[in-house]
Amino acid sequence: MIFYGYDNCSTCKKAEKFLKDSGSIFEKNDIVINPPDTKMLKNIIDKSEYTIKDLFNKSGQMYREMDMKNKIDNMSEDELLELLSKNGKLVKRPILINKDKFAVGFKEEVFKKVIS
C-alpha cells in the first residue's frame, strides 16, 4: 500500500495511526515533497468514484491563494492533474492506495475497505 500524507496534518496523523494500529504495511510519502504523479492521480479518477475536483484540498491555503474555486471549471483535466502533481499542498490528504482501491481524505470505514 502507498500512503500520502503530511506530517503537519492532524488528519494524516490519525490516518497513519489507524494504519499502524491495524498492522498494515505501507510505503509513506510526504505529499508536499513527493506528490502523486499525474498517472497515479488519473488512475484514482478512472478506477474509483472520485472526480478530479475531489482530489483538491479545497480548505487549503494554496487553493484559496490560487483562487482555484474560480479557475477549476475552466481548466482541462490534464491541466488540473499537472497542477496537482506539482503542488502537493493542493492535493486532498491523506491518500491511501492499495492496488485498485483508493481513499482520499480519512474516513475510517473507507480505509478499512481499502486495506482489506
Image: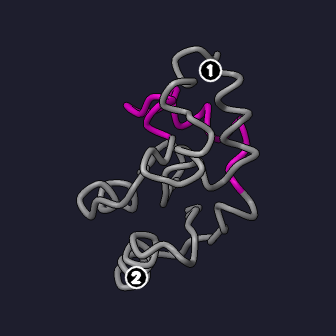
Task: Quickly name the residue at label 1.
Answer: 77
Task: Quickly name the residue at label 2.
Answer: 17
Dividing the picture into quadrants, the one containing residue 20 is bottom left
The extreme left residue here reads 109
Q: Is residue 56 above or below residue 30?
A: above
**Snapshot colouring:** one colour
**Boundaries of the magenta span:** 35-55
Q: Is residue 94 above or below residue 56?
A: below
Q: Nearer the viewer, residue 63 or 114?
A: 63
Q: Nearer the viewer, residue 28 or 76?
A: 76
Residue 42 part of the magenta-drawn span: yes
Q: Secondary structure at mark 1?
A: helix
Expressed as whole percent of the image width and height from the top left, the position of residue 2 reads: 59, 61
Density class for disc 1 (Cα within 10 Å; few <14, some 14-19, many ≥20) is some
Identity of the residue drawn at 57% across and 70% down: 6
Identity of the residue drawn at 55% across and 62% down: 1
> Considering only order in the chain, which callout, 1 or 2, is on the residue closer to the N terminus?
2
Q: Is residue 1 above or below residue 28?
A: above
Q: Amino acid type of disc 1?
A: Glu
Residue 53 part of the magenta-drawn span: yes
Q: Amino acid type of disc 2?
A: Lys
Q: Nearer the viewer, residue 98 or 61?
A: 61
Q: Secondary structure at mark 2?
A: helix
Q: From the viewer's perspective, is 48 left or right of 41?
A: left
Expressed as whole percent of the image width and height from the top left, the position of residue 48 reads: 42, 33
Q: CA distance from mark 2 to mark 1?
A: 33 Å
Expressed as whole percent of the image width and height from the top left, the position of residue 52 reads: 51, 29
Expressed as whole percent of the image width and height from the top left, the position of residue 31 reads: 64, 61
Q: Nearer the viewer, mark 2 or mark 1?
A: 1
